[in-house]
C-alpha cells in the first residue's frame, strides 16, 4: 500500500498542460482515487500493481502518464521515422477492450496535434488494415496477445524498444489461456522497462507471478466504487422458472438496457429465443460471432438501440457501457472473480448500478462460494409472485442431505469443515423447509 496523499485536483498530479486541457474538455474535474494515488508514482517510472475495481478510471491512470512520458521524450516530432518500434504496449484480453482502451488513449492525446500515434490490434478481423495502420510506426499499441504475435512475426511491429508495458485485466492476462503468448511476448521486450498491472481482482497464483514481472512495485489498492453505487441482489427461483422470472423482471422494470450473462454460447441463442417468445427482443454477444457483428452489437447496446443483451463472459471484462442500469446473472459464472468482473459493468464511474443473480437450488452452493471468495453476503430474496415452492425447498433439502455422502472417503477433518460450510450454504432455504 502506498501512503501517498490524495490530490483532489488534476493540476496537483504533475500532468502537462496538453493533458490537463484535454481533461478539462472531457469534464474530468476530480481525479478518481486510483488516478490520484497512482499517476504521481507512474510519472516517476515506478512499477505498479494496482487493484482497482473496474469502472474506477483505470484507463486514464495508465494512459495519461504513458502519453506524457512519450510526448516529453519526443516533443512534437511525429511518429514516422521510427520504423516498426513501439514504446508503449497495453495488453488486454478481449478485442472489444482493445478498441475501447485505444479509443480512450487517442482521446486523451487530442492536444498533441497528432504527435502520438496509438493503434489497436486484435484478432477476428483482417490483419491487413492493422498492418496498414502500423506502417510508419506507432508510439502505443493496444493489443490482444495472439494478433500482436502475428504482427511481430510478419515484422510489422518490434518490441525491442518498449519502455512501458501495461497488463490491463492482469489477472486474466496472467492466468491460464494467455500464458504461452505472454511468455513469448515478454521474451521479446527489454528487461528494463516500466511494468504496470491493473486488475479488479488478484487471485493468489497471479500475485506470485507478478513478483517475477515487477521490480519494487508501488502497490495500490483502492475500492473506489462506492458500495452504495452498485446494489447487488440475489433472488431464489424455482428450478426451470428462471426464464419466466427474467422476462417478468425485464417487463416490470423496463430498464433502458440490461446485460444478461449466461455461461455458454449456445445458451445465449437459447435464452434469446425463449425471451422472444415472451415478447422481449434480445440480442446475443459471444465469441462465435464475427468481429464486425460483435462491434455492431456492442455499439448498438451502448447507444441503447439494443435494450437486452445476452452475453458470455467475453463481455464481462472492461467494457465501458455508460450508465448501464443492470447486470443480471442468469447463470452464475464459474469463477468468483468473474462474478466481480460481470457486475462491474454496472455502477461504473460512480453511477448507480444494479447487479441481480437468479439462483435455483442447484446454484446455492456455488453462490455461497462466490460470496465467500468475494467477501460479501447477500440476503436471499424472492421475486414477488414467484415464491419458491415446496418441491424446490424439498429438492434443496435433499441435495443438502446428499452433500456429505457425495464426498470422497477419507480426511474426516476436512469432511467436517465442508459440512459446516454446506449447512451455512443452505441457510435461507432451511427455514422454509421446516
Ligand atoms: P475505466 O475504469 O478506465 O474504464 O473508466 C470508467 C469511466 O470513467 C470511463 O467512461 C471514463 O471516461 C470515466 N472517467 C475516468 N476518469 C474520470 C474522472 N476523473 N472523472 C470523470 N470521469 C472519469
Image (cartoon, rainbow, N blue to C red):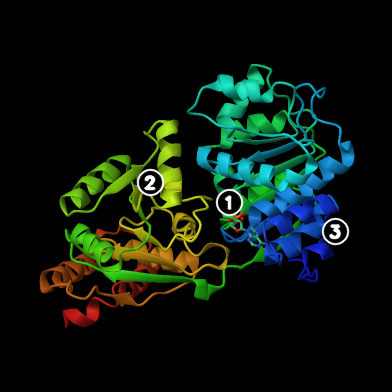
Task: Identify the secondary structure beneath mark 3.
Answer: loop
Q: Is residue 243 left or right of residue 83?
A: left
Mark 1 and mark 2 lie on one chain; the one further toward the N terminus is: 1
Q: Residues within 10 Å of mark 3 (few under 14, many from 20)?
A: few
The image quarter containing residue 69 is top right
Task: Identify the secondary structure beneath mark 1.
Answer: helix
Q: Which mark is residue 44?
A: none
Structural distance between the alpha carbons of marks 2 and 3: 40 Å
Q: Could you say where residue 195 lies in the image, as x and y percent from the top left?
A: 74, 45
Say which quadrant the N terminus sits in: bottom right
Say which quadrant the C terminus sits in: bottom left
Q: Nearer the viewer, mark 1 or mark 2?
A: 2
Q: Residues within 10 Å of mark 1 (few under 14, many from 20)?
A: few
Q: Could you say where residue 272 lies in the image, as x and y percent from the top left?
A: 25, 47
Q: Residue at x 22, y 60 (%)?
A: 247
The image quarter containing residue 28 is bottom right
Is residue 92 placed above or below 128 in the rendered structure?
below
In front of the other: 60 or 211 = 60
Q: Quadrant of ligand 1?
A: bottom right
Q: Residue at x 57, y 19 (%)?
A: 128
Q: Is residue 14 left or right of residue 278?
A: right
Structural distance between the alpha carbons of marks 1 and 2: 24 Å
The image quarter containing residue 21 is bottom right
Q: Which residue is mark 1?
A: 205
Q: Which mark is residue 312?
A: 2
Q: Is residue 233 left or right of residue 428?
A: right
Q: Which residue is mark 3?
A: 14
Mark 2 and mark 3 lie on one chain; the one further toward the N terminus is: 3
Amino acid at each position: 500500500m502506498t501512503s501517498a496523499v490524495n490530490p483532489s485536483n488534476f493540476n496537483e498530479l504533475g500532468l502537462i498542460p496538453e493533458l490537463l486541457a484535454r481533461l478539462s474538455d472531457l469534464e474530468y474535474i476530480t481525479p478518481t482515487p486510483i488516478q490520484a494515488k497512482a499517476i504521481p508514482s507512474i510519472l516517476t517510472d515506478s512499477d505498479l500493481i494496482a487493484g482497482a475495481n473496474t469502472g474506477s478510471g483505470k484507463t486514464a491512470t495508465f494512459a495519461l502518464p504513458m502519453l506524457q512520458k512519450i510526448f516529453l521524450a519526443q516533443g512534437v516530432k511525429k511518429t514516422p521515422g521510427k520504423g516498426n518500434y513501439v514504446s508503449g504496449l497495453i495488453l488486454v484480453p478481449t478485442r472489444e477492450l482493445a478498441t475501447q482502451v485505444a479509443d480512450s488513449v487517442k482521446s486523451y492525446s487530442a492536444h498533441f496535434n497528432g504527435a502520438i500515434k496509438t493503434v489497436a490490434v486484435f484478432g477476428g478481423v483482417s490483419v491487413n488494415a492493422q498492418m496498414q495502420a502500423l506502417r510508419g510506426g506507432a508510439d502505443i499499441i493496444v493489443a490482444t496477445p495472439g494478433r500482436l504475435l502475428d504482427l511481430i512475426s510478419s515484422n510489422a511491429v518490434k518490441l525491442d524498444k518498449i519502455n512501458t508495458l501495461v497488463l490491463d485485466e492482469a489477472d486474466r492476462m496472467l492466468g491460464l489461456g494467455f500464458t504461452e503468448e505472454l511468455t513469448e511476448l515478454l521474451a521479446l521486450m527489454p528487461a528494463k522497462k516500466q511494468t504496470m498491472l491493473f486488475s479488479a481482482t488478484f487471485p493468489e497464483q497471479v500475485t506470485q507471478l507478478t513478483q517475477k514481472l515487477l521490480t519494487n512495485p508501488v502497490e495500490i489498492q483502492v475500492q473506489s466504487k462506492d458500495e452504495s453505487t452498485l446494489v447487488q441482489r440475489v433472488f431464489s427461483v424455482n428450478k426451470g422458472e428462471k426464464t419466466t422470472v427474467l422476462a417478468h423482471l425485464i417487463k416490470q422494470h423496463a430498464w433502458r438496457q440490461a446485460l444478461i450473462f449466461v455461461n455458454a454460447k449456445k445458451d445465449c441463442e437459447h435464452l434469446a429465443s425463449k425471451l422472444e417468445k415472451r415478447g422481449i427482443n434480445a440480442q446475443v454477444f459471444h465469441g462465435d460471432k464475427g468481429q464486425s457483428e460483435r462491434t455492431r452489437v456492442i455499439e448498438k447496446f451502448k447507444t441503447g438501440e439494443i435494450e437486452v443483451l445476452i452475453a458470455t463472459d467475453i463481455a464481462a471484462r472492461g467494457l465501458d457501457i455508460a450508465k448501464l442500469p443492470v447486470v443480471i446473472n442468469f447463470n452464475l459464472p464459474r469463477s468468483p472473480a468473474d462474478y466481480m468482473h460481470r457486475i462491474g459493468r454496472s455502477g461504473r464511474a460512480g453511477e448507480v448500478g444494479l447487479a441481480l443473480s437468479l439462483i435455483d437450488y442447484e446454484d446455492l452452493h456455488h453462490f455461497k462460494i462466490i460470496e465467500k471468495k468475494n467477501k460479501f453476503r447477500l440476503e436471499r430474496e424472492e421475486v414477488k409472485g414467484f415464491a419458491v415452492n415446496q418441491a424446490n425447498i424439498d429438492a434443496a433439502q435433499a441435495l443438502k442431505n446428499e452433500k456429505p455422502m457425495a464426498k470422497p472417503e477419507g480426511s474426516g477433518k476436512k469432511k467436517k469443515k465442508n459440512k459446516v460450510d454446506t449447512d451455512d450454504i443452505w441457510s435461507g432455504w432451511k427455514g422454509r423447509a421446516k
